[in-house]
Image: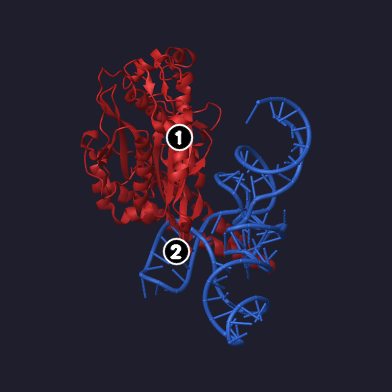
Chain colours: A red, B blue
Amino acid sequence: MHDLATFRANLDAIAARLADRGFTLDVEDFRQLDARRRAALTEAEQLKAQRNSESQEIGKLKKAGQDTAGLQAKVRAIGDRIAALDEQVKTIDEEFRQHLASIPNVPGESVPAGRSADDNVEIKKWGAPREFAFEPKAHWDLGPRMGILDFERAAKVTGARFAIYFGAGAKLERALINFMLDLHTREHGYTEVLPPFLVNSASLFGTGQLPKFADDLFKCEKFDFWLIPTAEVPVTNIHRDETLDGDALPLRYCAYTPCFRSEAGSYGRDVRGIIRQHQFQKVELVNFTRPDQSYAELEHLTESAEAVLEKLGLPYRRVVLCTGDMGFSSAKTYDLEVWMPGQNAYREISSCSNFEAFQARRAGIRAKSAKGKSEYAHTLNGSGLAVGRTWVAIVENYQQADGGVLLPEALRPYLNAESIGSDGQLR
RNA sequence: GGAGAGGUGGCCGAGUGGUUGAAGGCGCACGCUUGGAAAGCGUGUUUACGGGAAACUGUAACGAGGGUUCGAAUCCCUCCCUCUCCGCCA
């Protein structure tokens, strides 16, 4: 959600920048709606001021024992006009609010202009893809063959785009979760949070998933509860409608949660393996900052996610998303892409975004320093990392000629083993 | 799920239809006082939106939404949340 005053003052500049991300803002329409809103509001407020003073007058006259019938009738008529005007203001306001809420965030200054993912800019590359002495396999072959991953039974139990992990497969997922949480809490200044996995509509509005993206979510039938598509939703909303102590910022939270996405509109994409599932596990990083801190914090956040890949010895690259490829609420986004030998490609494993005040305005998250005014906080989040895709990266990057998987040093203490054999056993 | 109690400003806590945006207290800020401090005294201390260069000013907000009324924190309805007891349960 945009700030109305800023929006009004910089309408043309904002419209130009939004055009960079493929969004057309009807400037004239906006101006007209704004003028209508102001006119109705002003008139209603003037009438209310009159009603207030005359009602008070009635009180005084009654105390003095005088007749007030005439005045009461007059004020009643004013009340009727106010009711009509209020209705008008409400309608315009709602139209205006919906209009504003459907406009995506304005890209930050350092974001390159572009139309699609092809225009994203690689800004860093770490590690070199391993040279295999044999033809590397994809995880959807390796996993089932080792007996640690099962798609067919998952389809029976639930349906397509679900998986069941067995034995060392399940343990590997759990080890990764613990490894990531430990790393972020011990070395990157994060506080671990275990939030609800179901949230209400207000929370989804706060982070920007509603009203536009309801189709991407799973909804409970009899309750205003939705399955979270990411821990970003419950964790960011922890501080909804709060004023944070500006001097105590940044606030850094990390959370492990399962994530549930309908993946509407992605039919036919990534149908093999566990790259794109209706349920996946993720460790999420969520930060709250003052406006002056958020871009430095985006670097820290992204580096925290990168540290996971580096400690696991997984080659990756960092790209900055161009204006046309960014998410609705984001002002700037870095994607981390890990090398997947089985697919011979870099695949997204983390997305780190600075939302500036876009979410904070929707969610009412403010910051106030001892010597400062109350202002909207900036919020950021990023995957640190998507656990399922990290699982895939390890299995594919560390696969051995015999069909087993060597474990990265950093993970061995968590599994108390050095490898997973081709028979699926930890050794 | 059943029964009951309750939700007021940064905090505690008054207030059951009229000059109450809200007494009183605490906290905080500034000033006076003091050799310095404490005490004391004084002043100030919410947010959003509109108008104004500013001083200032209008409207709204006492869990949320709706209703009654000339007028609602106060009366009525619906919902949400918290607490206590009972039931059930990982």
State how far apart marks 1 and 2 are (Cα). Answer: 39 Å
| Mark 2, other Cα within 10 Å: few <14 / some 14–19 / many ≥20 | few
Residue B20 horizontal side relative to residue A287, left or right: right
- Quadrant location of residue B72? bottom right
Marked residue chain, label 2: A
Q: Position of residue A421 (x, y in %)?
A: 41, 17
Establish whether labels 1 and 2 are both on one chain. yes
| Number of residue marks | 2
Give the residue drawn at x 40%, y 20%: A161
Q: Position of residue B36 (x, y in %)?
A: 58, 82
Q: Position of residue A123 (x, y in %)?
A: 24, 42
Which residue in the structure is indicated by mark 2? Answer: A372
Task: Using the image, tell me which numbered label, if any, was put on residue A353.
Answer: none
Which residue in the structure is indicated by mark 1? Answer: A179
> Which of the two residues, A288 or A56, is positioned nearer the viewer here?
A288
Residue A16 horizontal side relative to residue A58, left or right: left
Can residue A218 be seen by looking at this rendering? Answer: no
Asked if A427 appears above or below B2 in the picture, the reply is: above
Residue A351 horizontal side relative to residue A154, left or right: left
Dot placed on the residue nearer the N-terminal end, 1 or 2:
1
- Quadrant location of residue B19? bottom right
Query: SS of the residue at dot 1?
Result: helix
- The amino acid type, in three-letter code, at marker 1 is Phe
Give the residue drawn at x 40%, y 24%: A277
Asked if B65 appears above or below A336 in the picture, the reply is: below
Marked residue chain, label 1: A
Asked if A109 appears above or below A268 in the picture, the reply is: below
- The amino acid type, in three-letter code, at marker 2 is Gly
> Which of the two residues, A383 or A112, is positioned nearer the viewer here?
A383
Tag in front: 1 or 2: 1
| Mark 1, other Cα within 10 Å: few <14 / some 14–19 / many ≥20 | some
